[in-house]
Every structure is written in C-alpha cells, then in structure tokens.
C-alpha cells in the first residue's frame, strides 16, 4: 500500500481560520502506520480522533460515536471501504472522504456512487486532507445555504432549504448532504446553466481540486433517487458540453 507523505514542517495551524474546534473524525485504514500519522496530524489541528483498522470496527464506531467526518480507505481486507460506505449511509450522514491508491480506476467512482463526499489519492499530504475536511465542514448542516425561507418547486419536486427535506409527489426522498447541496444549488437558480466547475466551487468550495467527474456521479445518484432517470429527464437537465441546469427540457 502506498504511504501518504507527511513532513514535520507541515504540522500546525492551517490558514487564518485557526483550529476547527472539537470536530470528531474517524480514520479507517488497515495500515497502522498511516492511521497513526493521520490521527496525530488531525489531533494537532484540534480534532477529536477515533481510529479503526477494519470495516467492522469502523461501522461500530460510527454507530456509537457519531463522527462528523470519516476518512475511509478503499482497499481493506474483509469489509472494504466501498461496502463500509454503503452500509454507513443507511444510518449516518457523516461526511466521508475515501482514500484510494488508484485515482484513474473505477474504485473512485464506485466509492462516490455509494455516498462518499470526496476522495484523495495516495500518497497525499495531511495538509490537503485537513483542507478538504474543512471545506466539507463549512457547508451547512441541518440548515439551508440560502436565506430564502420558501420551498423551491419544480413540478411535483419540492425542496425545502430550511429543513433540507426533499419530496417528489409528496413522497420523501433521502439525500446525502452532498446530494442535497448539489440539488439545492440547481433549484435555487432554475434554468441557469452551471458548469461542473461552478457546482464544485459552490458545493465543495473554491479550494477544492480534483476530478470534476464527481459532480456527474453525485447528480446521477440524485436523479435515480428522484426517479428522474427517464429520457428526457423531468428535473435535472444535462446541457451537452457545458454542465447542468434545473428545469424542463
């Protein structure tokens, strides 16, 4: 397994915002040395850190400790990270960052398709990991990104920005935080075409960098959950060569 890169000079507060407070993070990897380095770095940055060396222990800790964010390796013996994320998503809305040694391989897209919010490719810098976590945590939790108290509607699709609830024809639809934030970005400005880069900047933050395909994967999950995978789709439209918009075709 490839090891992350970490140098002593990287330790310490990042940026002007200071430590993030007692955010609870769970680090899951079968490589003990990697877990120790990541955990030590996160603790120096002010995080409360839990660790697990396998998928079964990870799921137990998520249930018992309710971490805010889970740093989860894809390739683990037994219960791998993909299956851990799939099961975790049935009872937790913790942010999930997948760790993978193969950025170009299908495991990245599969990880995102089961509900992960972001990914990092090994080897990586702990500084980058902390920046990614902070970017996720800056997003709203349990409240809307918009100050508009009104629910947004598109046909029988209703998105409430205050309660973060989504219904289709009166039926509730369970979305992850990332899925909701992407849908809300489109719903707030219907018929406006967003590029993938614009959606990444709005949902993941301006400091994010990586493969823009994660927008396609997450919106694909949103479409399936909304029953919007017909041709043509009823709600989320693909604008070929540009990006996405909300509204009838």
Image: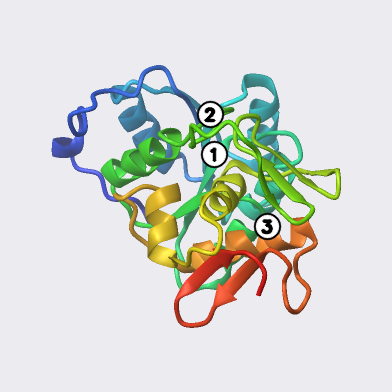
Q: Is there CB contact under 8 Å for labels 2 and 1?
A: yes
Q: Distance of mark 2 from mark 3, alpha carbons? A: 22 Å
For the C terminus, give its image quadrant: bottom right
In front: mark 1 or mark 3? Answer: 3
Residue sitting at x 38%, y 57%: 122
Residue identified by numbered label 3: 222
Residue identified by numbered label 1: 95
Q: Is any atom of residue 53 visible in this view?
A: yes
| N-term-proximal mark, 2 vs 1 | 2
Among all residues in the image, which is located at the extreme top? 22
Q: Is any atom of residue 73 visible in this view?
A: no
| N-term-proximal mark, 2 vs 3 | 2
Local secondary structure at mark 2: loop
For the N terminus, give its image quadrant: bottom left
Looking at the image, is 41 positioned above or below residue 87? above
Residue identified by numbered label 2: 68
Q: Residue 203: x and y, percent? A: 45, 48
Q: Nearer the viewer, residue 215 or 202?
A: 202
Q: Quadrant of residue 15?
A: top left
Q: Nearer the viewer, residue 154 or 46?
A: 154
Residue sitting at x 73%, y 67%: 234
Q: Distance of mark 1 from mark 3, alpha carbons? A: 17 Å
| N-term-proximal mark, 1 vs 3 | 1
Local secondary structure at mark 3: helix
Q: Nearer the viewer, residue 73 or 181?
A: 181
Tell me if 244 is positioned left or right of 168 in this view: left
Q: Residue 112: x and y, percent? A: 58, 58
Q: Is there CB contact under 8 Å for labels 2 and 3?
A: no
Tell me if 241 is positioned left or right of 223 in this view: left
Say few, some or many: other residues with alpha carbon within 10 Å of mark 1 (under 14 / 14 to 19 / 20 or more).
many
């Amino acid at each position: 397994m490839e090891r992350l890169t970490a140098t002593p000079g990287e330790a310490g507060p990042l940026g002007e915002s200071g430590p993030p407070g007692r955010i609870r993070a769970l680090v899951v990897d079968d490589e003990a040395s990697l877990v120790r380095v990541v955990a030590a770095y996160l603790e120096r940055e002010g995080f409360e850190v839990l660790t697990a060396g396998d998928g079964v222990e990870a799921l137990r800790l998520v249930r018992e400790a309710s971490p805010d964010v889970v740093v989860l390796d894809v390739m683990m013996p037994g219960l791998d990270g993909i299956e851990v994320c799939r099961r975790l998503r049935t009872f937790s809305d913790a942010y999930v960052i997948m760790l993978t040694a193969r950025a170009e391989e299908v495991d990245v897209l599969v990880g995102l398709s089961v509900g992960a919010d972001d990914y990092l490719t090994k080897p990586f810098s702990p500084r980058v990991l902390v920046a990614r976590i902070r970017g996720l945590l800056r997003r709203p939790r349990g409240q809307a990104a918009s100050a508009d108290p009104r629910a947004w509607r598109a046909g029988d699709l209703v998105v409430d920005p205050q309660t973060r609830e989504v219904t289709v024809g009166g039926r509730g639809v369970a979305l992850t935080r990332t899925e909701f934030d992407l849908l809300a970005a489109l719903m707030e400005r219907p018929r406006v075409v967003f590029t993938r880069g614009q959606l990444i900047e709005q949902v993941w933050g301006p400091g994010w960098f990586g493969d823009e395909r994660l927008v396609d994967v997450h919106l694909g999950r949103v479409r399936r959950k909304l029953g919007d995978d017909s041709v043509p789709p009823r709600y989320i439209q693909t604008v070929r060569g540009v990006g996405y918009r909300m509204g009838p075709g």
